[in-house]
Amino acid sequence: MSKVMISEYWDHGKKKAIRRYSIHGGTIPPTIFDWNGEKYIMPGWYKLEKHEYNIKREDIAYYPFKANKPKLPNIDKNKVYKVLSSKGNKHYEVKMNNTGSMECTCPGYGFRRECRHIKEITSSL
């Protein structure tokens, strides 16, 4: 989710603080949106005050979301690793998906998107 961040500072001799705006996160670049006579910075729905209406889109800094790539050591994309369950009565399959992340067939991974089976495979390699 995008956040509108505001930094404010006083310049010598000015009657009002100077504001700078930036958008952090998200994939949509910033824009200024008019709705019902009010102006907003989008995304984020930050409502501008009347004295702030003179800003331009170029005045808003944009820092898009960048996904962290998983650092997985020497894992073959086509290989399926079989891991014994904690009770010892089942085997779960751990493999790499198309995005480069590991996934498991155990119920814990289905709920939390992480499990001990993935940690076991990545630590053993």
Image (spheres, rainbow, N blue to C red):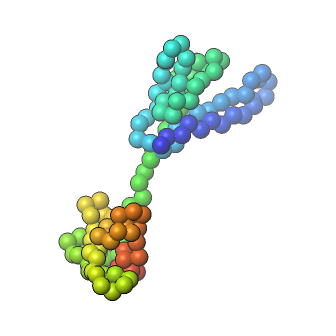
Q: Residue furthest top?
A: 37
Q: Is residue 122 visible?
A: no
Question: Is residue 44 at all visible to an observer of this figure?
Answer: yes
Could you tell me how many numbered marks the image carries?
Answer: 0
Rendered location of residue 41, percent (x, y): 52, 28
- Residue 21, horizontal then vertical, whole percent: 58, 33
Identified at 47% across, 33% down, the residue is 43
Image side of residue 15 versus residue 38, left or right: right
**Residue drawn at (43%, 35%), measured in percent from left and top?**
29
Q: Which one is in front, 124 or 62?
A: 124
Quadrant in which the C terminus appears: bottom left
Residue 68 is situated, as x and y percent measured from the top left of the image, at 42, 58
Task: In the rendered view, tell whether residue 124 sits above or below residue 18.
Answer: below
Place of residue 55 in the rendered image (x, y in percent of width and height, measured from the top left): 56, 22
Q: Residue at x 35, y 69 (%)?
A: 107
Which residue lies at the image location 79% right of the left edge and 24% below the top edge? 13
